[in-house]
Image (tube, rainbow, N blue to C red):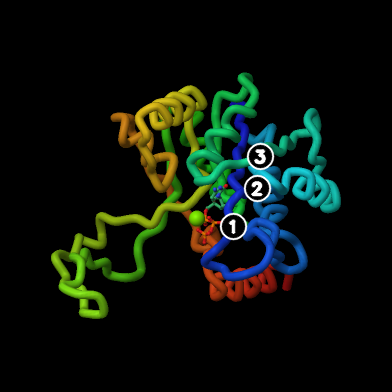
Amino acid sequence: MNAAAVVPAAGRGERLGPGAPKALRELGGVPLLVHAVRALSRSRAVTRVVVVAPADGVARVRALLEQFGLDGHDGAGITVVPGGATRQESVRLGLAAVPATADVVLVHDAARPLVPVDVVDAVARAVADGAEAVVPAVPLADTVKQVAPAAAPGRPEPVVGTPDRSTLRAVQTPQGFRREVLLAVHEKALSDGVEATDDAGLVERYGGSVVVVPGHEEAFKVTRQLDLVLAEAVLARRRA
Ligand code: CTP
Ligand code: MG
């Protein structure tokens, strides 16, 4: 197996609040992106990492990766390319920089800095073992309600259903794909104007099959301030 990882890191992190782009915000003094790239590099399956940086931040990201001992230049395992306006566009741009020699592509959010290497390995392994698309996922802790729009702004939303929680999973990254499958669905989505919230969603949309492997609670996404507090605590526990 020869796996490349695409790391979308071009988002602004609006829900985290004002400051640097989310991928460059620090956790234990180290940018989220650096944590994420290190986690991927620890997997023996991963031979190349393509970081998708904010379009106006490519030089800054290269410098940062070098500063933390991760070479930002071609030929040394890490490539940095400019991202797009949506996550999907950023992944597509990253995918275009994946070498043709890679048969497996992992897509991993920079916003999931603490993913354990075992999860990375398990996803890559499941693709190598024959799956065309693999997502790591965990059971839901909360019951989920489907709601309809409120009758008027400020009024409570009516509940219209409660899906059986045991059949639901919260999906994480890295998501793993046979390279040609991911390329094909991103190309089709571009020409059809289709948007999905994750890459596996595009595979589903075009009739492909997606399977789930166990994720990990520490692979959570840093989205809001509270997630950063939790991430700092997890990191401190690991370092203890
Ligand atoms: N991402 C990206 N390009 C975009 C938007 C998002 O590469 N145009 C990346 C983010 O950098 C992040 C991952 O996709 O690593 C998951 O997105 P999300 O958690 O939504 O991050 P942001 O879009 O940065 O945050 P927000 O939605 O709060 O602005
Ligand atoms: Mg976003």
Residue 68 visible, this orientation: yes
Camera-side residue of 215 and 194:
194
How far separated are the C-alphas under marks 2 and 3? 6 Å
- Callout 3: 10 Å neighbours few (<14), some, many (20+)? many
Residue type, numbered disc 3: Pro
Residue 75 sits in which quadrant? top right
Q: How many marks?
A: 3
- Dot 2: element: loop
Location of the C terminus by quadrant is bottom right
**Are the residues flagged by discs 2 and 3 in contact, CB closer than 8 Å?**
yes
- Relative to residue 98, is residue 28 drawn left or right? right
Residue at 59% from the left image edge and 27% from the top image edge: 96
- Relative to residue 65, is residue 175 drawn left or right? left
Q: Identify whether 147 is placed above or below 190.
A: below
On whether ligand 1 comes within 8 Å of the CB at mark 1, the answer is yes
Where is mark 3, residue-wise? Answer: 82
**Are the residues flagged by discs 1 and 3 in contact, CB closer than 8 Å?**
no
Mark 1 or 3, nearer chain start: 1
- Dot 3: element: strand
On whether ligand 1 comes within 8 Å of the CB at mark 2, the answer is yes
Residue 12, label in figure: 1
Residue positioned most to the top: 100
How far separated are the C-alphas under marks 1 and 3? 13 Å
Location of the N terminus by quadrant is top right
**Are the residues flagged by discs 1 and 2 in contact, CB closer than 8 Å?**
yes
Mark 1 or 2, nearer chain start: 1
Residue at 20% from the left image edge and 66% from the top image edge: 149
Residue type, numbered disc 1: Arg
Residue 43 visible, this orientation: no
Q: Position of residue 34 (x, y in %)?
A: 72, 53
Residue 54, label in figure: 2
